[in-house]
């Protein structure tokens, strides 16, 4: 058997899901892990990491000195660019959590580093690996609903229930995390993946659901895609309701309703309406997984082995950040915006 890929992980809260994926992947071995506040952050699953067989190192430099083949960056958003660039400069391939970075400017630095080093790079847009969304995408690609005319999605979450992050970085004015981008990037990426590039976006936002958090907590955006499709996005980190990413895709030949928490997606097809004489949704069963990082890792490792391009590469992650930045600019200016291009 070929040697396994040595994997190092930075940031051990979301990093725990990644560590489990690494340990369950027959092509990978978890070699070293790092968390800047390993001793202080008591929400880290110490027992799990101490039994994992990986070295628990006390600096990011030590993580890179262990010479991993792959580094998974699962630290807070504002460290993604810096840690990813250092890892690539050290000769590692990188999987970086979403949002790729907090700003388009940092995305450009990351793109330059990928081009300079020639390393493989994946943005962790995990929703593309959720079974419900993956099936919806396959049906769209197959032409089952024809050309997409209208699409809407939402990322509706409540971060008040323990999602502030260690030292409340998601909430703090000092970090200034834009939560409609930080969390809403899941929905933004989904729109782009399904309907292509938006050429303009107009958005409104407010700060009523989480007034003690530093940034805008909710937004609506309307989008016009280069394809001619139109779209709507709702992103909020303060809704008083269960988490949802309900997505509706209206095509010229049918409609799909899907999400990442149900055991099915729904499909209504024009041609079936003609035969059945009625308009109804068919339920198509799908698996539910709370975290799909294992699928992401499997895909990344397959691309390392066969040399094929990574679908969620640095440009894809950057375009999603660009859409988020355009939404935030539109909220501020009250004007439509064109997302930056790469
Ligand atoms: N794909 C998903 O569905 C998903 C879900 C949750 C979080 N995330 C992403 O994962 C990242 C981490 O989020 P989280 O929920 O684990 O946050 P968290 O605050 O719960 O945990 C972050 C961990 O990183 C550590 N840390 C802080 N600074 C660090 C640094 N410079 N280097 C290494 N470690 C550092 C902290 O001590 C903490 O243990 C974020 O970018 C977030 O957007 C993605």
Image (spheres, helix red, strand yellow):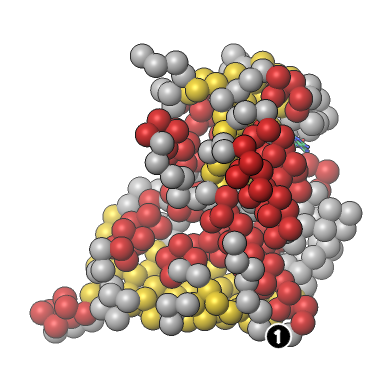
Give 263 or 9, whichever is nearer the viewer. Answer: 9
Q: Is residue 17 visible?
A: no
Q: Position of residue 90 (x, y in %)?
A: 67, 28
- Residue ranking furthest to the right: 174
Q: Is residue 24 left or right of residue 214?
A: left
Q: Is residue 255 left or right of residue 70?
A: left
Q: Position of residue 296 (x, y in %)?
A: 47, 41
Residue at x 23%, y 75% (from the top left corner): 269
Give 160 or 139, whichever is nearer the viewer. Answer: 139
Location of mark 1 (residue): 335
Give 59 or 114, whichever is nearer the viewer. Answer: 114
Image quadrant where residue 55 sits: top right
Residue at x 80%, y 55% (from the top left corner): 171
Q: Position of residue 229 (x, y in %)?
A: 43, 80
Q: Quadrant of the N terminus?
A: top left
Q: Is residue 338 left or right of residue 60?
A: left
Image quadrant where residue 282 sits: bottom left
Regarding ligand 1, which quadrant of the image does it lie in?
top right
Q: Position of residue 91 (x, y in %)?
A: 62, 28
């Amino acid at each position: 058997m070929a040697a396994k890929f040595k994997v190092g992980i930075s940031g051990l809260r979301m990093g725990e899901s990644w560590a489990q994926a690494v340990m369950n992947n027959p092509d990978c071995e978890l070699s070293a892990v790092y968390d800047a506040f390993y001793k202080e952050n008591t929400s880290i699953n110490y027992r799990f990491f101490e039994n994992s067989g990986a070295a628990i190192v006390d600096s990011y430099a030590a993580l890179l000195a262990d010479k991993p083949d792959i580094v998974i960056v699962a630290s807070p958003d504002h460290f993604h660019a810096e840690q990813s660039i250092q890892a690539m400069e050290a000769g590692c391939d990188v999987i970086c959590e979403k949002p790729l970075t907090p700003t388009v400017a940092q995305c450009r630095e990351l793109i330059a580093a990928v081009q300079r080093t020639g390393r493989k790079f994946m943005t962790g847009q995990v929703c593309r690996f959720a079974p419900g969304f993956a099936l919806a995408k396959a049906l769209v690609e197959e032409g089952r609903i024809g050309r997409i005319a209208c699409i809407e999605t939402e990322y509706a979450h409540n971060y008040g229930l323990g999602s502030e992050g260690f030292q409340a970085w998601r909430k703090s004015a000092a970090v200034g995390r834009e939560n409609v981008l930080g969390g809403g990037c899941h929905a933004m990426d989904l729109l782009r993946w399904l309907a292509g590039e938006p050429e303009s976006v107009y958005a409104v936002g407010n700060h009523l659901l989480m007034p003690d958090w530093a940034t805008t907590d909710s937004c609506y955006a309307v989008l016009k895609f280069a394809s001619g499709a139109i779209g709507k996005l709702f992103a909020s980190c303060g809704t008083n309701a269960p988490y949802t990413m309900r997505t509706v895709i209206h095509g010229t030949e049918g409609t799909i309703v899907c999400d990442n928490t149900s055991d099915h997606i729904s499909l209504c097809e024009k041609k079936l309406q003609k035969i059945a004489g009625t308009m109804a949704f068919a339920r198509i069963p799908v698996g539910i997984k709370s975290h799909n990082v294992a699928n992401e890792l499997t895909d990344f490792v397959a691309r390392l082995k066969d040399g094929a391009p990574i679908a969620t590469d640095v440009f894809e992650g950057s375009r999603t950040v660009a859409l988020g930045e355009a939404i935030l600019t539109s909220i501020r200016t009250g004007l439509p915006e064109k997302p930056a291009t790469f």
